[in-house]
Amino acid sequence: MAKKTTDMTEGAPMKLILHFLIPMLFGLLFQQLYNMVDAIIVGKYLGVKALAAVGSTGSVSFMIIGFCTGICSGFSIPVAQKFGEKNESGLRRYVANSGWLAVAFSVVMTTIVCILCRRILIWMKTPEDIIDGAYAYIFVIFLGIPATFLYNTLSGIIRSMGDSTTPLIFLLISSVLNVVLDLFTILVLHMGVGGAAWATIISQAVSGILCLIYMKKKYPILKMKEDEWKPDKNSMVTLCGMGIPMGLQYSITAIGSVVLQTAVNSLGSVAVASVTAGSKISAFFCCPFDAMGATMATYGGQNIGAKKLDRIQQGLKTCIILGAVYSVIAFIGIYFFGDLVALLFVDKGEIDILRNTRQFMLANAAFYFPLALVNIVRFLIQGLGYSRLAIMAGVFEMAARSLAGFCLVPFLGYMAVCFANPLAWIAADIFLIPAYFHVMKRLHRLMGSSGVLSNS
């Protein structure tokens, strides 16, 4: 039985956005849940230093894995645009060439970063008491880059055709498997933090394989003709033109995070453990913002393919309202329940870590609405085909976090760490909001006013 896709170029934007967003949100929540489970099991069974070791790799992992996921997200945008155009042959060519590029990128990146990862940890001034654990964890995560490309490329293609439910189902399976493997590798096999990393990449590989099997069976629209399988230079140029800027956006943003993590490392393992716990909890609460961004990328891609600029503006307003409402709810949730969640990571006797974790979470939660705008506007711009502008937003974020790491942390200490992310979000918005109006003005000029815009 063929799987039904969702056309986001017709119908009420609020209904379509929520229909697409909610399954994706649950998928992201479960993804963050098993990331939290990694940290919880490590913190509870291996101790605070092991938790700090895993946490110290967060920024460099974000830089490398974020580049991979950004490339995959970029690959899905031309697919969404061809879906909006109802150009099935063009859609299949992009899907096939996404696969060829994903294989090439995964091989090259895995080789390079596995060779350099210990040197990177030394450059980041990772404390001596946790560097061996950090290396044991991040080396395995980098070995799993092909699994990252597999899942993110295929799930992005599925979502680009309006189906955000199927990747959720496979992510749920992956999440349960990850928890089981965490417990097995750490408690039974005594593999330490490396066991947690193996659990993560194995579970992600399983979800990617499930996506591949499902696509072959349920999407007749993707049944390739012989010439559509072949590598195509023009298709690859277009895909790289979308994917590489999106990947660079993540990596450039992450450079600031690496600078900031280096500054946190200089404050000692207690500060590293506090930021690790606070970041894991905050990431869980921030999942709706990530879902809104991914939704707007698909929504924008399909509607620009259908040349419906009016619907793009309607969708943006709808999503901003959702972001504002949730920002308030999230702050209230963290204020009243954040301490309880923090106790999942460390024992109640770790008073300094618990205090620092709460401070970090509240400082971030107070600025969640600027974060909502970053995700909504940036991904919408990318969906419209202007990925390079997202790089500039990443530059603004990088500059803000680097400023905090180089200049503020040495003088203000841990307090500067707490407000580094809000500073980065505001800096990105200062660029993104004018950039959106520039893009829309340009698109209106390119399409003219000769009736191509739709009021449907």
Image (spheres, rainbow, N blue to C red):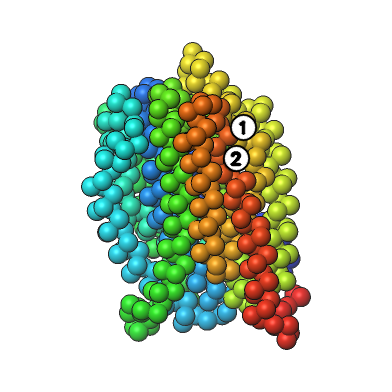
Q: Residue at x 53, y 57 (%)?
A: 392
* Residue reaching furthest to the bottom: 450
Residue, disc 2: 422
Residue, disc 1: 363
Mark 2 neighbour class, 10 Å CA radius: few under 14, some 14 to 19, many 20 or more: many
Residue 91 percent location from the top left of the image: 47, 76
Local SS, label 1? helix
Residue 254 against residue 456 in the figure, above or below: above
Residue 185 visible in the snapshot: no
Which amino acid type corresponds to the residue marked 1 in the rendered image?
Ala
**To which quarter of the image does residue 295 belong?**
bottom right
Residue 58 against residue 163 in the figure, above or below: above
Residue 358 percent location from the top left of the image: 58, 25
Residue 126 percent location from the top left of the image: 34, 31
Residue 27 is left or right of residue 177, and the answer is: right
Residue 117 is left or right of residue 37, and the answer is: left
Q: Residue at x 55, y 55 (%)?
A: 393
- Tell me, yes or no, whether the two marked residues, 1 and 2, touch with CB atoms within 8 Å: yes
Mark 1 neighbour class, 10 Å CA radius: few under 14, some 14 to 19, many 20 or more: some
Q: Please tell me which of labels 1 and 2 falls first in the chain.
A: 1
Residue 334 is left or right of residue 241, and the answer is: right
CA separation, marks 1 and 2? 8 Å
